Image (spheres, rainbow, N blue to C red):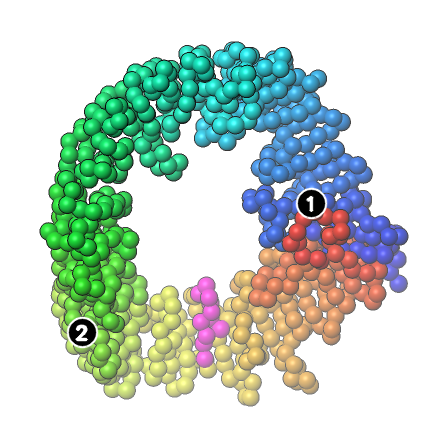
């Protein structure tokens, strides 16, 4: 009778080095030594995605927050403590940065549990990778991680910072005596403490947009230390390019981030061009004077004197469209296209061109070359279906064609659809079921109802083509330059090696050599390609041979049957006996066997009929029979190689049941075939067996871990066709008792009366973890 020092009413399996146990309505977690470590798991999450929805017990990214008494800690999926359970709170909402507190003091730590600054301050805010705002006795200062000391003394009532800006600001906003100013990371005051502030329009450059004074918003420039505010300035607008347009005395001017005035207060309006957040920043501004519009750049240079009725529109980042006048101009103000005869303009950004419409037709214009691409109008012009940026699609009378950027017709306008062929830099033109092929120079490779297929291995520039509508596909070979290497006469084409191809036409076979540009007929009744090699399996005078393509000769050793395998092996037979040869005809496994099956990784199962029973063993790639042919083949078992082990089966004469064992690649029998099921676990650590409805564990050499059979071995998961994982200590069941054993086969001093989940979800804030 088993007696245990600690007996629990409930216990879970061990996961991450811990198990949950239960007694008298309370539960807690123990380690392998049976010592209570913490009380409950309160949360768990994925440190790479910040979510818990897809977590499982095997996730390498899972971390668990636990409670031990009134303190909290965090451990990872390997059971390593990232944070010892000594903290009052742990806030992981930022995912990659956790805020921890203990005895009223706060710090920040990384996901590996490393504190970024001492656990000393009342509150902490990260400004960037080096600087942290820290609070002590109600005041704020700046701490530097690199020097591990205060960078700016603690003296401010509050701080604020643009944490979401594209690059780290060199300053922060601080509050003192109920007013806000700006201080740099060396402690120098950049803006005096005379402003009100709210967290609005925060920036990281020389402009401060969040200040106000006497209830009125203003803009402050740090470079010159000046506030642009009413009554002197009004209607301030910070443009995307970092320049400030503002009004003074009823006129607008432009101020650079440096504080320099680049445009005088001489305009009725100044606005940015293409102020889309997702567009590249541009150096242009629209100016309005005497009710007409012009164009300036942010250096203050006037590019286009005000003369247009509406503000110019930036197109393709370097040209400008005057909508009212219908003209396109460049950055020097020159009109490069007069579109007065056209009623609509659109931009094809991928091609970098413009299209204009008149009389229901579209014309394409290249603004860089300042020329029309098309010499006629089309119903539609687009670029959306073509990955190659030098091709323009055009539609006329419901049919599509393709032009290059010089207007040359690449594909005639007569197809349903045009796109990029998956053969490379080529176009397909589809009409009905036919996909015709054109090069980017406009050469028609296939036209008039042809289709194409890639070769299986794609080691060459060639592809197969065939005529649509034939009773049987007849393939030819063509390269991407349009050269036909063989006409479409063949039912099959097989790619060999070094430019050789096997061509099959009815019952005749031929070899194409692309180096010699020759096609030679083969004098054999049946030919099978060993693809990606230069060897063939051929039939001559009712016998099979290996044929060396490079030498053009038979290997003079006949066989009754031949079957190509992988890695250059061929299964052959003579007189009903099977063996393995290589492509040179050298015997790898003698022709002595009933059958041979190729396994993965260069191993073979060798079968031999023995009376009514089929026996088997295993051979390696050198032909060595490392497991003798003495095991009974089970036709209902389809996997004989698993995780580097070889399955051994032996039939019981009385029951006809098959018992199983395991050998390794040296032929050593690790587990004698005495078991109904055998599963390797934890790589090569050992084996789990099932026999007579009992389970047990063996070590890596097949010896029992302890002299006991169990009713069950409790696993975290039993994935089909996947390696078995046992979490140590293992949970074992015998009778009505669950107990635990280690990898040495030793029973531990605690047990449980029933199986309970690893996580009590009533205590947890997480989601998605299986109940185990």
Q: Foreground mark, 1 or 2?
A: 1
Q: Position of residue 431 (x, y in %)?
A: 22, 69
Q: Which element type, helix, strand or loop, lies under badge 1?
A: strand
Residue under circle 2? 488
Residue nearer the viewer, 311 or 454: 311
Quadrant holding the N terminus: bottom right
Q: Which mark is residue 43?
A: 1
Asked where in the image residue 486 lies, by quadrant, the reply is bottom left
Residue nearer the viewer, 667 or 410: 410
- Vertical order, 363 against 681 (above or below): above
Q: Residues within 10 Å of mark 2 (few under 14, many from 20)?
A: some
Residue nearer the viewer, 44 or 223: 223
Span shown in magenta: 595-605
For the residues labelled 1 and 2, the Cα–Cα distance comes to 66 Å
At a point 14% along the width and 48% down the height, the residue shown is 373
At a point 28% along the width and 87% down the height, the residue shown is 542
């Amino acid at each position: 009778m088993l007696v245990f020092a600690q007996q629990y009413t409930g216990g879970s399996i061990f996961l991450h080095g811990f198990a949950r146990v239960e007694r008298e309505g309370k539960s807690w977690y123990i380690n392998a030594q049976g010592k209570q470590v913490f009380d409950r798991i309160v949360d768990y999450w994925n440190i790479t995605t910040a979510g818990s929805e897809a977590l499982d017990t095997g996730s390498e990214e899972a971390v668990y927050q636990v409670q031990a008494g009134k303190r909290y800690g965090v451990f990872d999926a390997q059971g390593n403590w990232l944070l010892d359970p000594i903290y009052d709170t742990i806030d992981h909402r930022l995912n990659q940065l956790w805020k921890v507190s203990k005895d009223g003091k706060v710090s920040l730590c990384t996901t590996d549990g490393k504190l970024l600054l001492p656990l000393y301050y009342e509150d902490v805010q990260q400004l960037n990778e080096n600087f942290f705002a820290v609070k002590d006795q109600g005041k704020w200062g700046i701490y530097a991680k690199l020097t591990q000391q205060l960078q700016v003394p603690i003296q401010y009532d509050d701080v604020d910072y643009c944490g979401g800006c594209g690059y780290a600001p060199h300053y922060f906003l601080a509050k003192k005596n109920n007013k806000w100013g700006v201080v740099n990371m060396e402690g120098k005051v950049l803006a005096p403490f005379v402003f009100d502030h709210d967290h609005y329009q925060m920036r990281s450059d020389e402009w401060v947009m969040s200040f106000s004074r006497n209830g009125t918003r203003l803009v402050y420039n740090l470079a010159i230390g000046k506030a642009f505010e009413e009554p002197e300035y009004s209607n301030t607008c910070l443009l995307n390019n970092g320049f400030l347009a503002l009004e003074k005395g009823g006129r607008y001017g432009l101020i650079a981030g440096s504080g320099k005035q680049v445009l005088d207060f001489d305009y009725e309006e100044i606005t940015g061009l293409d102020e889309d957040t997702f567009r590249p920043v541009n150096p242009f501004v629209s100016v309005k004077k005497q009710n007409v519009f012009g164009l300036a750049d942010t250096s203050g240079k006037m590019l286009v004197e005000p003369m247009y009725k509406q503000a110019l529109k930036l197109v393709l980042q370097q040209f400008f469209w005057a909508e009212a006048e219908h003209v396109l101009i460049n950055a020097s103000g020159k009109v490069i296209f007069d579109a007065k005869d056209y009623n609509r303009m659109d931009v094809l950004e991928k091609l970098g061109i413009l299209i204009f419409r008149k009389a229901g037709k579209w014309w394409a214009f290249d603004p860089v070359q300042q020329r029309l691409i098309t010499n006629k109008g089309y119903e539609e012009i687009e670029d959306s279906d073509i990955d190659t940026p030098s091709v323009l699609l055009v539609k006329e009378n419901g049919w599509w064609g393709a032009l290059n950027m010089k207007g040359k017709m690449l594909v005639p306008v007569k197809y349903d659809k045009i796109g990029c062929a998956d053969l490379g830099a080529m176009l397909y033109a589809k009409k009905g079921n036919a996909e015709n092929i054109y090069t980017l120079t406009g050469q028609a490779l296939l036209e008039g109802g042809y289709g194409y297929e890639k070769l299986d291995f794609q080691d060459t520039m060639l592809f197969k083509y065939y005529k649509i509508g034939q009773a049987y596909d007849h393939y030819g070979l063509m390269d991407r330059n349009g050269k036909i290497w063989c006409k479409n006469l063949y039912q099959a084409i097989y790619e060999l090696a070094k430019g050789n191809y096997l061509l099959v036409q009815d019952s005749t076979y031929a070899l194409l050599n692309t180096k010699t540009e020759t096609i030679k007929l083969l004098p054999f009744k049946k030919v099978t390609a060993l693809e990606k090699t230069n060897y063939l399996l051929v039939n001559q005078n009712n016998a099979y041979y290996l044929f060396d393509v490079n030498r053009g000769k038979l290997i003079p050793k006949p066989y009754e049957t031949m079957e190509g395998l992988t890695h250059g092996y061929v299964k052959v037979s003579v007189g009903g006996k099977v063996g393995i040869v290589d492509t040179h005809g050298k015997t790898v496994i003698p022709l002595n066997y009933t059958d041979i099956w190729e396994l993965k990784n260069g191993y073979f199962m060798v079968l031999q009929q023995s009376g009514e029973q089929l026996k088997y063993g295993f051979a390696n790639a050198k032909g060595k029979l490392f497991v003798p042919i003495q095991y009974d083949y089970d036709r209902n078992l389809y996997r004989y190689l698993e995780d580097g082990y070889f399955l051994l089966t032996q039939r019981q004469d009385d029951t006809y049941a098959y018992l199983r064992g395991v050998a390794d690649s040296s032929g050593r029998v690790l587990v004698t075939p005495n078991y109904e099921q055998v599963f390797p676990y934890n790589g090569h650590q050992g084996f789990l067996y099932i026999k007579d409805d009992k389970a047990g564990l063996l070590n890596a050499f097949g010896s029992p871990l302890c002299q006991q059979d169990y009713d069950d071995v409790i696993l975290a998961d039993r994935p089909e066709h996947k390696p078995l994982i046992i979490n140590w200590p293992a949970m074992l069941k015998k009778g009505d008792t669950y107990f635990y054993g280690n990898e040495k086969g030793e029973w531990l001093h605690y047990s449980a009366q029933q199986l309970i989940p690893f996580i009590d979800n009533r205590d947890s804030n997480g989601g998605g973890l299986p109940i185990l």
